[in-house]
Amino acid sequence: FGFEFFYAKGGRQFISRLKGKKIFLDLKISDISATSSAAIRSLKDLKNISYITVHANAGFETLKAVKKMAKQSNKKLKILVVTVLTSFSNSSIKKIGHTQSINEIVKKQVLLAKACGCDGIVCAGSDLKIVKKIFNGEIITPGIRLKGDSVNDQKRVTGPAEAFKNGSTSLVMGRSIIKGNIKKNVQRLIEQLK
């Protein structure tokens, strides 16, 4: 579940009622350590949350604080570190002041996540080979598109089979599944994974 669902009226209550499911809460927390760890603490009533995302850009202190708070408030909660968003290209990342390539930034972010003891990485399919060389935990890939689908606002997309081939352990899929006929889209996904 992402921002839009979680913050919608009744979103949190809906999630709290789900039982026996692994819940991936994609909030992309990115703030100072005190605020970010307080955000994790505020979720302690949601015992069914298995994964939560935190931006690598929040830095070492925040990642350490979030990991520590997760251990205290919900021992099964895994911290997934989000690297450079799939909506960025090398040219667009330079527009916000970065002087390094996406590959170089992602490598540093993964090393940071590893140093903080985080449980997984969320990265674009184009970054999987780099991440796999450094990180030995869960690697989740967003920006998945089925053949023939529009990339929309994404810059670095990949197909589902390619993502698994390159080291992804899980996929995040939104528009390619929910836009149009969901049953047909799921069938297309199954076919493309063969």
Image: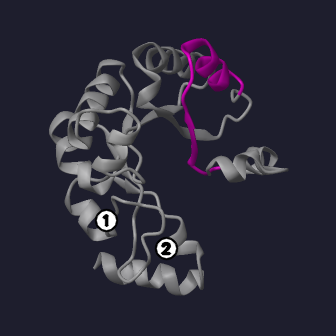
Categorize mark 2 by other alpha carbons within 10 Å: few (<14), some (14-19), many (20+).
many
Q: Earlier in the sequence, mark 2 or mark 1?
A: 1
* Residue 161 seen in this snapshot: yes
Residue with the most extreme right position: 9
Mark drawn on residue 176: 2
Residue 106: quarter of image = top left
Please name whichever residue, 191 or 163, is drawn nearer the observer in this view of the structure: 163
Residue with the most extreme left position: 133
Q: Does residue 43 appear to the left or right of 161 in the view shown?
A: right
Please name whichever residue, 22 or 87, is drawn nearer the observer in this view of the structure: 87
Categorize mark 1 by other alpha carbons within 10 Å: few (<14), some (14-19), many (20+).
many
- What amino acid is at disc 1? Thr
Please name whichever residue, 22 or 81, is drawn nearer the observer in this view of the structure: 81
Residue at figure coordinates x 33%, y 68% from the top left: 160
Residue 154: quarter of image = bottom left
Against 169, is 173 above or below?
Answer: below
Magenta region includes residue 49: no
* Residue 19 seen in this snapshot: no
Against 154, is 190 above or below?
Answer: below
> Residue 60 at x, y = what percent?
40, 16
> Residue 124 at x, y = what percent?
33, 52
Mark drawn on residue 17: none
Magenta region includes residue 30: yes
Cα distance in 3D space between marks 2 and 1: 12 Å
Against 108, is 116 above or below?
Answer: above
Q: Which residue is mark 1?
A: 158
What range of the chain is rendered magenta?
20-42
> Residue 22 at x, y = what percent?
56, 48
**Label 1 secondary element:** loop
> Residue 24 at x, y = what percent?
55, 46
- What amino acid is at disc 2? Ser
- Circles 2 and 1 in contact, beta carbons < 8 Å: no
